[in-house]
Amino acid sequence: MSKTIILIPSRLSATRLPGKPLLKINGISIISHVVKKAKEADIADVYVATEDKEIVNDVNLNGGKAILTSNQHKTGSDRIFECFEKLNLINIDYIINLQGDEPNIEIKDLKHLKKLIEVNKPEMGTLASEIDDKSKLMNENIVKVITDNKINDKNFPVALDFQRKVNDFNANIYHHLGVYAYKPDILKRIIKYKQTNNEIQNRLEQLRALENGIKINVALAKFCPIGIDTMEDYIALKKKLEYKS
């Protein structure tokens, strides 16, 4: 069985919604909700990688573990690699990078990704769900992944491209979820590459991996979580989760 660790990058200075990780739903911060979900998946130890002591304190208060990192990182990948090095772990086969703004991530989808990386041993793996509404194709807040084959429950096709806007619905286009699994040496390679123009323009760091010849395999997620990018997203998800409880 592959030995895996889940690292969650988080910071307070998000461009579109500053302070986002500590906004509360049912009295618990968004970042601590994500930690709770990751721990419930029971597939790996879980750590938050953050530049903010406030986040460290919140995560610790809610029973999680956090590592303080530099505030000079340009991407989440850089942040989790520093965290990984500070932890000084051995014999880790995969690092799972779980975004800190998706508190309703589906546990079964994380388990499915873990299963596929154990079987297929990819350089990188990620998750994507079906797109149920064509209007999402032009929504820049919803990242799309185009794969070489249609995704199903058992296969693990290769990502050809990631885009924010897509005009053609006939290709194998899916809603990309912000979850990545890397071999540690692959993550180390990625952060050493210079950010590409395409990556900077589209604000998609996975493009740096693709454009440097790193293969990303895509697993099917059955559930599409609501990522929190704006105050409207937060209010909508807060209402949904607090109503369910």
Image (cartoon, rainbow, N blue to C red):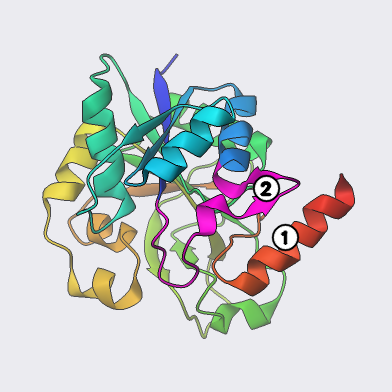
Image spot of residue 67 (x, y percent) = 34, 32
Q: Residues within 10 Å of mark 1 (few under 14, many from 20)?
A: many
Secondary structure under the numbered disc 1 in the rendered image? helix
Quadrant location of the N terminus in the rendered image: top left
Nearer to us of marks 2 and 1 is 1
The image quadrant of residue 163 is: bottom left
Q: Quadrant of residue 225?
A: bottom right
Q: Which numbered marker is on residue 237?
A: 1
Magenta segment, which residues?
Answer: 11-31
At 64% across and 26% down in the image, what residue appears?
A: 40
In the foreground, 186 or 213 = 186
Contact? badges 2 and 1 (CB < 8 Å): yes
Q: Residue at x 44, y 59 (%)?
A: 148
- Please tell me whether residue 154 is drawn above or below residue 2 in the rendered image: below
Q: Amino acid at mark 2?
A: Asn
Q: Secondary structure at mark 2?
A: loop
Of labels 2 and 1, earlier in sequence is 2
Frontmost residue, 102 versus 234: 234
Q: Is 21 within the magenta?
A: yes
Residue 230 in view of the camera: yes
Q: Give the tally of numbered discs.
A: 2
Q: Could you say where residue 43 lies in the image, as x and y percent from the top left?
A: 54, 22
Decide: few, some or many residues near mark 2? Use Cα within 10 Å; few <14, some 14-19, many ≥20. some
Residue bearing mark 2: 104
Q: Quadrant of the C terminus?
A: top right
Asked whether, in this view, residue 161 is left or right of residue 20, the answer is left
Residue 66 tag number:
none
